[in-house]
Amino acid sequence: MNANKRDIESIWIDPDDAPELTDEWFEQADLYKGGNLVRRGRPTDSPSSIVQLDSDVLAAFRASGQGWQVRMNSVLRDWLKAHSPA
């Protein structure tokens, strides 16, 4: 008897059902070289931009630890809610 054996359900996935790897997919992918992350992938619908900031402002946000760019974006978004950019 096999009363002690667990039933293992096999789920077969057809490799032909895999999505096509397009140029857009590769642009959004993380880039690794030798197991080290070289560039984090970015969604194409939300491009980042380069902004010049005073070094003391940048240093203060960087000193706040990981996620400082998200916090900086949040602060700027809150400012826009209270002020007219024009």
Image (spheres, rainbow, N blue to C red):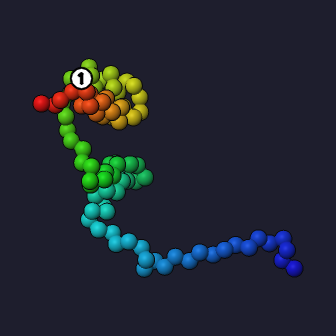
- Looking at the image, residue 77 sits to the left or right of residue 11; the answer is left
Against 16, residue 26 (above or below) is above
| Res. 76 in view | no
Q: Nearer the viewer, residue 14 or 74?
A: 74
Q: Quadrant of residue 44?
A: bottom left
| Res. 14 in view | yes
What residue sits 26% from the left and 53% below the top?
Answer: 45
Which residue, as the protein is rendered here, is positioned at the far left? 86
> Disc 1 on helix, strand or loop?
helix
**Label 1 crowd (10 A; few <14 / some 14-19 / many >=20):** few
What residue sits 87% from the left and 79% below the top?
Answer: 1
Q: Which residue was labeled with disc 1?
A: 55
What residue sits 19% from the left and 34% below the top?
Answer: 51
Which residue, as the protein is rendered here, is positioned at the far right? 1
Against 29, residue 17 (above or below) is below
Q: Quadrant of residue 26?
A: bottom left
**Residue 83, how many percent across, how many down?**
21, 27
